[in-house]
Image (cartoon, helix red, strand yellow):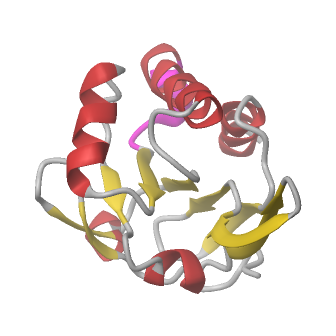
Amino acid sequence: MLAPGDTAPDLNLVDQHGNTVKLSAHKGRNVCVYFYPKADTPGCTTQSCLLRDLQAEHTDELGTTAIIGISPDTSAKQAKFGTKYSLGFPLLADTEHAVAEAYGVWKEKSMYGKKYMGIERSAFLIDGKGKVAEAWYKISPKDTPAKLLAALTS
């Protein structure tokens, strides 16, 4: 698990528009990287829409902070999700879950007694130097924007 002060693993993934996104391209600015299990499901939609609204309503507090969402969905599914909810920020396709593993969020999960591997909903605030400023594992969809805002304004 990553902790504040750790160097954030770089990402090199394709977004919903087919563009390659790298964390290293954001040097000098804060980045909120959040991982969600599956596009267009209730919790993931709530989390993404709340971050979209936070970005629109708290421009002074967020400043140049970028928001990047990551799930194991394909770019096509990310595009449909992003368009449906007018998210306006990159949604990256981590279909091989390599970045999720690097961030420690690819975990064994259980539902109705069945075990499977999947994303543990988590979020990270990465500072302009590429260091983890905050790491929120097992975060609830509704807590993501509040914790991000609190971290940026403290």
Where residue 51 appears, as percent x and y from the top left, is 53, 30
- Relative placement, left or right, of 128 versus 112 is left
Where residue 88 appears, as percent x and y from the top left, is 29, 31
The residue at 57%/51% (across/down) is 36
Q: Nearer the viewer, residue 88 or 30?
A: 88
Seen as rendered, the residue at the extreme front is: 113
Is residue 53 found inside the magenta-colored segment of the image? no
The residue at 60%/33% (across/down) is 47
Exactly how many numbered labels are in the figure? 0
Quarter holding the N terminus?
bottom right
Seen as rendered, the residue at the extreme top is: 57
Is residue 62 found inside the magenta-colored segment of the image? yes
- Relative placement, left or right, of 89 versus 129 is left
Where residue 7 appears, as percent x and y from the top left, is 58, 85
* Vertical side of 7 occupied by 89: above or below: above
The residue at 29%/45% (across/down) is 77
Q: Nearer the viewer, residue 41 or 45?
A: 41
* Vertical side of 33 occupied by 23: above or below: below
Would you identify the image quadrant in which residue 4 lies?
Answer: bottom right
The residue at 41%/81% (across/down) is 10
Give the extent of the magenta segment. 58-64
Quarter holding the C terminus?
top right
Would you identify the image quadrant in which residue 21 lies?
Answer: bottom left
